């Protein structure tokens, strides 16, 4: 599986999860940035415009859903960035439905499932942009 | 039908009042029965007396007729035997008149008897005159007919009067008997109605609410924790229902807290488990992303899990009343130093300690004291997620050692301060993003209380919190005055 240099923004309040995912995804060819809360995440989004966001739900200062909402209202174009939700909250499917993303993973998850979901999100994005450019 | 605005009657007073009313009714019935019995007995006596009078008067009438017959016989035959018989009837007449006189009981009767006596005397005198003259039968019949018939008429009048009296008495007695039956019947009717009222009242006021209560208990046992008992209108049962509601409410609240707590624990365990899983799968990949830091991270997450599990076990043991303490004289400064060194900070919290120069000796279990300081320190770090200073101060005042842990974190709303130290509670507004299982403060309070101390908290939302643990000093320790030298150590 090749990520072909796709860029991922990981937003999770657990430092170890951020770091380990960064190491693993970097080894897989992703370009990875991490943020420990939604506020930092939004700032990084503005600066780097990643191909996909891996987002936790419950975080200090700004949670995942609130950050996703900010992505919609603030900048044109950000709504095209696919979001993969990964969290331990009980009603994750409902949270994902309300956020309008079909990609969600309940913690703890299999690494392969995460990679597959990231790939699907990236493929859809490419498909979406190509169909839009036709 | 709830009664508002006035106090509910108690079952005790209802029983007292109804017993009193029943007693009153029964006594009234008994008095009425006794009175009518006496009255009827008197009527019976009067009836007997009247009947006897009528008998005597009839005999008097018969004696007069007999005397007249003997008179005629004597005038016809002048037989001495007949004269003897006549003297007997004459004495009978006088005796019977005496008897009738003796039983006189009203003025009308008195007058009638006087007339009988007078007319009989007139007859006897006229008869005696005839005999003395040696008159013949025909003369005799003519001479005595008038006086004899007058006497007879007087006797008949007396008899009729007495018979009327007898009938009157009979009628009176019958009337009394009728009234008595009516009143007794009414009394028994009222008694039956009252009994019915007691039965219906018991069902409505006692049995109904009791069955409701039983049903409420059954529903509660069946799992409906929100069920409310209806106590009805009797104060004792209302009290019972209120007590049940209170108990059920407490149990329901505890259950809700425990369920919330369990859900929280399950959720909090997911993050470290996820981290460990990611780490292990990362290590298993080729080429392995194994670095010393990766192993360190895994170790840290496992420690976190272990601490949460240990907290759970501790809380379970403490809640079950099995807190074991081995107190020795310890210097609290060492406890604070050790715990600050091991503080689980992420690096953006500046932890300051203020310690006196002299030892602060308390009699305590060192491990438990470390647990107290560690829990307060972890909380201070956890609840200031944006970083910021955390201060741990140890001072002595008024014979007590005080450990004060202050942060500039999110703070605690005043309504959340009550119950803050209860187990299985986590503040909902700070739950998100703050790890832990919500048992730390309850453990702190139990441990401190077991050492004879207390925990206090001051907090302002958005400004921060200060938790103060006060423990009694060992007598040999430094006095309060010279314990105020402070040193600062920055970490």
Image: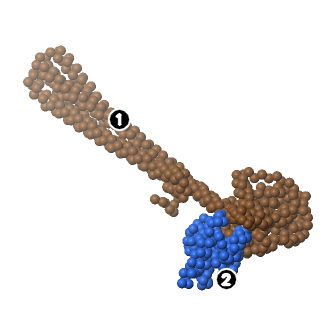
Chain colours: A blue, B brown
Marks 1 and 2: same chain?
no
Q: Which chain does the residue under circle 1 lie in?
A: B
Q: Which chain does the residue under circle 2 lie in?
A: A
Q: Residue at horizontal 38%, vertical 43%?
A: B188
| Quarter residue B239 falls in | bottom right
In the picture provided, is B163 more to the left or to the right than B418?
Answer: left
- Residue count near mark 1 (Cα–Cα under 10 Å), binned few <14, some 14–19, many ≥20: few
- Residue count near mark 2 (Cα–Cα under 10 Å), binned few <14, some 14–19, many ≥20: few
In the picture provided, is B170 more to the left or to the right than A44?
Answer: left
Residue A2 coordinates in the image, percent (x, y): 66, 72
**Tag of residue B41:** 1
Q: Is residue B127 visible?
A: no
In the picture provided, is B455 more to the left or to the right than B217?
Answer: right
In the picture provided, is B471 more to the left or to the right than A115?
Answer: right
**Tag of residue A46:** 2
| Quarter residue B394 falls in | bottom right
The number of numbered discs placed on residues in the rendered structure image is: 2
- B368 lies above or below B81: below
- B66 lies above or below A4: above
């Amino acid at each position: 599986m090749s990520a072909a240099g796709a860029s991922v923004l990981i937003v999770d309040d657990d430092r170890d999860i951020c770091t380990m995912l960064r190491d693993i995804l970097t080894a897989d060819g992703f370009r990875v940035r991490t943020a420990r809360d939604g506020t930092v995440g939004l700032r990084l989004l503005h600066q780097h415009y990643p191909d996909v966001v891996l987002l936790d739900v419950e975080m200090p200062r700004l949670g995942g859903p609130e950050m996703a909402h900010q992505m919609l209202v603030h900048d044109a174009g950000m709504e095209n960035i696919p979001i993969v939700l990964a969290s331990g909250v009980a009603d994750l499917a409902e949270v994902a439905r309300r956020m309008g993303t079909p990609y969600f993973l309940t913690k703890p998850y299999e690494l392969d499932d995460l990679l597959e979901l990231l790939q699907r999100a990236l493929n859809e994005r490419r498909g979406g942009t190509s169909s839009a450019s036709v | 039908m709830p009664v508002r605005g006035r106090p509910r009657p108690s079952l005790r007073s209802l029983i007292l009042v109804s017993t009193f009313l029943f007693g009153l009714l029964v006594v009234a019935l008994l008095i009425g029965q006794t009175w009518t019995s006496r009255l009827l007995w008197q009527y019976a006596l009067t009836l007997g007396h009247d009947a006897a009078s009528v008998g005597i008067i009839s005999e008097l009438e018969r004696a007069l007729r007999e005397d007249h017959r003997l008179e005629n016989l004597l005038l016809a035959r002048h037989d001495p035997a007949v004269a003897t018989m006549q003297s007997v009837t004459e004495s009978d007449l006088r005796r019977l008149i005496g008897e009738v006189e003796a039983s006189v009981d009203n003025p009308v009767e008195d007058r009638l008897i006087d007339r009988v006596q007078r007319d009989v005397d007139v007859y006897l005198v006229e008869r005696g005159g005839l005999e003395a003259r040696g008159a013949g039968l025909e003369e005799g019949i003519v001479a005595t007919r008038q006086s004899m018939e007058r006497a007879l008429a007087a006797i008949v009048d007396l008899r009729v009067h007495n018979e009327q009296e007898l009938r009157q008495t009979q009628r009176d007695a019958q009337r009394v008997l009728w009234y008595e039956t009516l009143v007794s019947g009414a009394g028994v009717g009222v008694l039956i109605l009252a009994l019915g009222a007691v039965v219906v009242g018991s069902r409505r006021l006692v049995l109904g609410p009791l069955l409701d209560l039983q049903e409420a208990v059954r529903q509660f046992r069946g799992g409906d924790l929100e069920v409310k008992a209806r106590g009805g209108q009797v104060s004792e049962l209302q009290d019972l229902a209120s007590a049940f509601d209170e108990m059920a409410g407490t149990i329901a609240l505890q259950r809700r807290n425990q369920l919330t707590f369990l859900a929280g624990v399950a959720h909090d365990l997911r993050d470290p488990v996820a981290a460990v899983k990611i780490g292990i799968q990362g290590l298993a990949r080729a080429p392995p992303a194994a670095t010393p830091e990766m192993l360190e991270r895994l170790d840290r997450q496992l420690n976190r899990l272990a601490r949460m599990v240990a907290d759970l076990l501790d809380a379970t043991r403490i809640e079950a009343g099995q807190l074991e303490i081995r107190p020795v004289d310890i210097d609290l400064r060492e406890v604070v130093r050790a715990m600050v060194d091991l503080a689980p900070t992420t690096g953006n919290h500046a932890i300051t300690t203020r310690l006196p120069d002299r030892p602060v000796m308390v009699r305590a279990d060192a491990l438990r004291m470390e647990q107290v300081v560690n829990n307060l320190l972890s909380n201070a770090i956890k609840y200031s997620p944006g970083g910021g200073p955390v201060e741990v101060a140890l001072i002595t005042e008024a014979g007590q050692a005080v450990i004060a842990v202050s942060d500039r974190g999110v703070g605690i709303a005043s309504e959340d301060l009550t119950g803050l130290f209860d187990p299985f509670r986590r503040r909902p507004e700070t739950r998100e993003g703050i790890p832990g299982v919500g048992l730390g403060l309850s453990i702190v309070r139990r441990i401190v209380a077991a050492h004879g101390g207390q925990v206090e908290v001051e907090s302002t939302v958005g400004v921060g919190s200060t938790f103060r643990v006060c423990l009694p000093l060992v007598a040999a320790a430094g006095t309060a005055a010279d314990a105020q030298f402070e040193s600062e150590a920055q970490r």
